Image: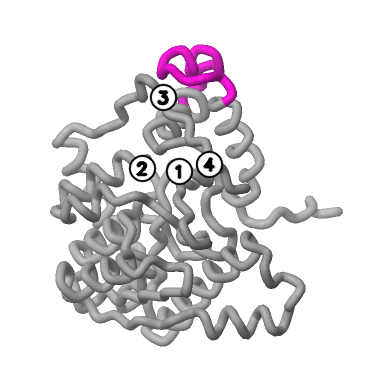
């Protein structure tokens, strides 16, 4: 994706929120999923990369509920582009709110070593940003292998369906506990499990470069994205009807369709040719 400064916003976004009964059901379903994944793998616990954002925070809360604080380990992995407040929030989640063991590992020296080995990529914002994300994935698995643990992903449905994740980066995990939740539902479930409101509502950013926000990069705010995904991509409602229903131009719907199509490869294992015989 490329950076964008224009963010489209629907006039009447679709309400994708859950009822209280649905929230309780999703909470139980996800914690049961985490528990069963760890048990079936014969693992001793889970590793989570903590960014200070709502997705990793909710996943950590649910993991602790499923496994207990002693079986969840967090990695906070800042780089020079990370906002200090986000890293403080990540440590706050681990230490103050959940009481899990965690470590802070600065990734800048590792990233610099990669760029020294391949200097042609230096200064390429997207390439460097993805390198940071993939470096974190390697550290997650180093810790998970050492601890006989599973790496829990923190991706949600909204971002997965438009490819807003790094292949073999934050997409490189053992399972995705909140993968069936739109961003609005992530925020709602977070409040349901008592994540503090300032964390549940904070602006989302992958922090792949200084000042980056998810909505500016995608060119749509999350309520609009969730609406288009639910109606057009998953619901089969036509482009024109979707645009009319939520009050947005058809170009916004087409933008989401293009992102969904272009990122299809990210949601599958690498393709291989059919057997010759």
Contact (Cβ within 8 Å) of mark 3 with mark 1: no
Element assignment for label 4 = loop
Of callouts 3 and 1, the N-terminal one: 3
User: In which quarter of the view is residue 82 placed?
Assistant: bottom left
Q: Nearer the viewer, mark 1 or mark 4?
A: 4
In the rendered image, residue 209, in percent from the top left (x then y), is placed at 52, 62
User: Residue 225, can we see it?
Assistant: yes
The disc, 3 or 2, on the residue closer to the chain's N-terminal end is: 3
* Magenta stretch, residue numbers: 235-251
Task: Give the colour scheme of this rendering.
Answer: one colour
Residue 198 forms part of the magenta stretch: no
Q: Which residue is mark 1?
A: 215
Residue at point 47% right, 27% down? 228
Is disc 2 in contact with disc 1, using a CB cutoff of under 8 Å? no
Disc 1 from disc 4: Cα separation: 9 Å
Please give the label number shown on residue 271. none
Query: Could you tell me which residue is drawn at 17 percent across and 50 percent down?
Result: 197
Image height check: is 203 above or below 147? Answer: above
Residue 5: mark: 4
Residue 183: mark in rendering? 2
Image quarter of residue 167: bottom right
């Amino acid at each position: 994706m490329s950076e964008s400064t224009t963010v489209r916003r629907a006039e009447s976004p679709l309400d994708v929120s859950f009822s209280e009964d649905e929230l309780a059901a999703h909470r139980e379903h996800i914690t049961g999923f985490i528990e069963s994944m760890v048990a079936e793998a014969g693992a001793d616990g889970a590793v989570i990369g903590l960014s200070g954002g709502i997705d990793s925070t909710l996943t950590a809360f649910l993991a602790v509920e499923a496994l207990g604080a002693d079986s969840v380990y967090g990695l906070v992995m800042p780089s020079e582009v990370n906002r200090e407040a986000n890293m403080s929030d990540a440590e706050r989640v681990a230490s103050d709110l959940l009481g899990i063991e965690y470590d802070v590992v600065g990734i800048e020296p590792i990233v610099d070593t990669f760029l020294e080995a391949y200097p042609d990529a230096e200064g390429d914002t997207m390439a460097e940003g993805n390198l940071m994300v993939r470096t974190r994935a390697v550290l997650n698995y180093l810790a998970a292998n050492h601890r006989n643990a599973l790496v829990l992903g923190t991706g949600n449905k909204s971002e997965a369906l438009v490819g807003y994740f790094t292949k073999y980066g934050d997409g490189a995990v053992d399972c995705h506990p909140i993968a069936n939740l739109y961003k609005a539902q992530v925020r709602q479930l977070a409040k349901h499990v008592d994540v503090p409101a300032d964390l549940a509502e904070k602006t989302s950013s992958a922090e792949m470069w200084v000042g980056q926000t998810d909505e500016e990069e995608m060119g749509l705010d999350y309520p609009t994205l969730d609406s288009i995904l639910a109606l057009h991509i998953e619901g089969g409602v036509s482009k024109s009807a979707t645009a009319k229903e939520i009050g947005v131009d058809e170009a916004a719907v087409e933008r989401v369709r293009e992102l969904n199509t272009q990122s299809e490869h990210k949601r599958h294992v690498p393709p291989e040719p059919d057997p010759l015989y």
